[in-house]
Image (cartoon, helix red, strand yellow):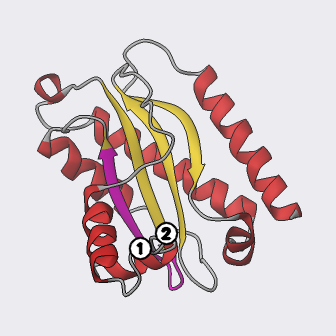
Amino acid sequence: MQLMRWIAMLLLSWVLAAAGGAHASEPVTNFNVVLLQPSAVLEARVPSVDALAEYIKAVQGALREAVAGSEAQEKTRQSVGGFIVLAVRPGLQSRVWIDFDQLLDLEVRKQIALKVGAVKPFEAREGPVVFALKVALWDGKESKRIAPLPAEWKRSAAAASASAATPGAAPPEVGALVESIWND
């Protein structure tokens, strides 16, 4: 329980610091960090709040670099909000999904996936850690959604529901969903 309080306080301070520094024509605006797993799961899987915070800061830097440095940036400068969804699993493996409210330019998507995916993750324990950064690009508005649902997740969850033995069965836990679609 103590770990989750520290995570929440650290993430809140990080978000407030990032929001305070935002001004017009910034490539990325941070709104918050969305934890997609229950506290007990995160406490078991996150080895240290500091490691998680460092990873988030590095991802944010890579995101900013990817958006600001995209080829033909003037043509691809889209004002849009959404989520950068991240999963980290044991063995220093990570995966990135991009879930914006509008279609994002293909070059920008590629740069985000490449740069953010190259950030060395923390060492997760006992299974994947899944969370999202709620952001906007180029003065876009904050997404009204409270949590992401990348297209690949939708397809996988729909397929799992369709093949479930019990009609109306609960969708898989997000960590299990991520593991089922992880492409190495």
Q: Is residue 8 above or below residue 184?
A: above
The range drawn in magenta is 89-99
Relative to 19, is 98 on the left or the right? left
Number of marks in the rendered image: 2
- Name, please, the residue furthest toward the top: 24
Q: Amino acid at mark 1?
A: Val
Which quarter of the picture shows residue 139? top left
Q: Tell me if I can see residue 54 in this picture.
A: yes
Q: Tell me if I can see residue 182 in this picture.
A: no
Q: Which residue is mark 2?
A: 174
Q: Which residue is mark 1?
A: 178
Q: Residues within 10 Å of mark 2 (few under 14, many from 20)?
A: some
Q: Position of residue 47 (x, y in %)?
A: 72, 74
Q: Position of residue 84 (x, y in %)?
A: 40, 49
Front one among 61 and 12: 12
Q: CA distance from mark 1 to mark 2?
A: 6 Å
Say which element carries label 1.
helix
Q: Position of residue 15 (x, y in %)?
A: 64, 35
Q: Is residue 8 above or below residue 19?
A: below
CB atoms at circles 1 and 2 under 8 Å apart?
yes
Q: Is residue 72 above or below residue 117?
A: above
* Rendered residue at 48%/71% (across/down): 170
Residue 95 lies in the magenta stretch: yes
Q: Which mark is residue 94?
A: none
